[in-house]
Amino acid sequence: MTQVFIVGAAGKIGRLLVEQASARGHRVLALHRARGQGADIAALGARPVQGDLLQLDAVALAGLMQGSDVVVFSAGAGGKGGAAMTAAIDGRGLELTVAAAQLAAVPRFLLVSAFPEAGRGTLRSDTFEHYMVVKKRADVHLAGSLLDWVILRPGTLTDEPGRGRVRAGLAIPYGNVARADVAAMLLALIEHPPLRRCIIELTEGDTPVFEALQALSPP
Ligand SMILES: NC(=O)c1ccc[n+]([C@@H]2O[C@H](COP(=O)([O-])OP(=O)(O)OC[C@H]3O[C@@H](n4cnc5c(N)ncnc54)[C@H](OP(=O)(O)O)[C@@H]3O)[C@@H](O)[C@H]2O)c1
């Protein structure tokens, strides 16, 4: 059993991961922002932990994640609150969580990032361009840490049912991917610690999730 601390646990990917990881018998601590989200999270089998990335400091957040084996960061402003909120959550929120993981000596850190080709070939708004810059800076920050990190870059997210099959690689063509399959890949990463310090691109595909992950692992 692994103790997993999920930041953004009430989000769409977060909830799916809470559900999947709890069903596999992991101890899941689920950081959510609004007090009203706690009962739903508990019903999925996790321990709700209320906290706001805009209010917490690294010491307080470290206290909440104490004893965890892995942190998953799947929080994001989701375009609400403009560029300032994207910078505060997707950017500084990630940096705060990395600092907290280091303070709490949580060794492993999984980040849900963004596929670099997102929106390429279309006229991207300044807001979207800024979002991509913040996401890349967050990747750079985590990759520069001493943590045992994996950065997952999913393509465009859909709410289709998960197929349990994906395409994963260090560099793959751009595409869509179901949030449920992103959660399944995060769960596989939680359960497969040998894969570390790498960036994985993820889209829909034909390979069962765990096989796709094993194919990326060192022999
Ligand atoms: N959309 C795409 O196609 C796409 C593609 C690749 C990657 N991504 C990235 O994938 C990640 C997850 O996506 P998703 O669909 O699961 O997003 P989501 O449903 O918007 O979930 C984001 C979560 O972050 C939480 N959050 C926001 N501000 C917070 C704060 N101050 N303190 C604590 N939590 C806070 C939200 O809390 P509330 O529930 O209280 O709002 C929400 O639960 C995002 O980082 C996104 O950038 C998206």
Image (cartoon, rainbow, N blue to C red):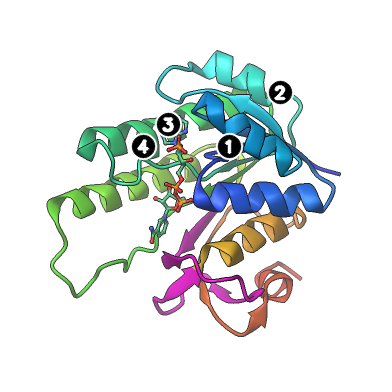
Q: Give the CA separation, mark 2 to mark 1.
A: 18 Å
- Quarter of the image where the N terminus is located: top right
Binning the other alpha carbons within 10 Å of mark 4 as few (below 14), some (14 to 19) or many (20 upward) gives: many
Binning the other alpha carbons within 10 Å of mark 3 as few (below 14), some (14 to 19) or many (20 upward) gives: many
- Amino acid of disc 3: Gly
Q: Give the CA separation, mark 4 to mark 1.
A: 18 Å
Q: Nearer the viewer, residue 186 or 145?
A: 186
The residue stretch that appears in magenta: 150-177
Q: Is mark 2 within 8 Å of ligand 1?
A: no
Residue at coordinates 48% horizontally, 17% vertically from top-left? 56
- Amino acid of disc 2: Gln
Dot 3 and dot 1 residues touching (CB under 8 Å): no
Residue position marked by numbered label 1 in the rendering: 146
On the picture, is 193 further left or further right than 58?
right
Of the numbered discs in the image, which one, if any, rests on residue 91? 4
- Amino acid of disc 1: Leu
Q: Give the CA separation, mark 4 to mark 3.
A: 5 Å
On the picture, is 114 further left or further right than 192?
left
Answer with mark 4 or mark 2, whichever residue precedes in sequence: 2
